[in-house]
Amino acid sequence: MSDGNKGRKPEIEGVVLTEEQKRRRRQRSVAIALVLAALCVLFYVVTIVKLGPAVLIRPL
């Protein structure tokens, strides 16, 4: 009744990337992350500029 495969994960068949493909995928991911971060900073700066200095003088 004991199974020889008990506790083992089934092997997944699929695409196996080469080291070059893994390196390029990582570079692409880093580039996308940097662009996203730059876009967030740009939106933040534009928002602060549009609010202007008067936002600090308003009554609470």
Image: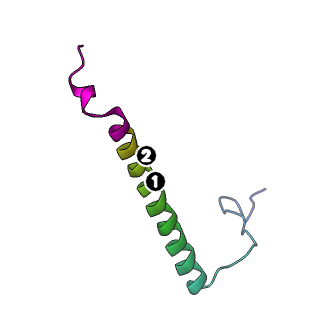
Quadrant for the N terminus, please.
bottom right
- Judge left or right: residue 28 versus residue 40: right
Give the camera-side residue of 54 and 25.
54
Give the camera-side residue of 52 and 13.
52
Give the camera-side residue of 47 and 54.
54
- Here the colouring is rainbow
Kindly indicate whether the residue at mark 2 contacts the one at mark 1 (C-beta within 8 angstroms): yes
Mark 1: secondary structure: helix
Magenta span: 48-60
Q: Which mark is residue 26?
A: none
- Image position of 25 with respect to 5: above or below: below
- Determine which residue is flagged by label 2: 43
Residue 52: image location, x then y, percent: 30, 34
Q: Quadrant of residue 2?
A: bottom right
Question: Could you classify mark 1 by the number of other residues whose Cα lies within 10 Å: few (under 14), some (14-19), or many (20 or more)?
Answer: few
Quadrant for the C terminus, please.
top left
Question: Could you classify mark 2 by the number of other residues whose Cα lies within 10 Å: few (under 14), some (14-19), or many (20 or more)?
Answer: few
Residue 37: image location, x then y, percent: 42, 55
Q: Quadrant of residue 58?
A: top left
- Image position of 14 with respect to 33: above or below: below
- Determine which residue is flagged by label 1: 39
Q: Amino acid at mark 2?
A: Phe
Residue depicted at 72% across the width and 64% down the height: 10
Residue depicted at 44% across the width and 62% down the height: 34
Residue 19: image location, x then y, percent: 56, 85
Mark 2: secondary structure: helix
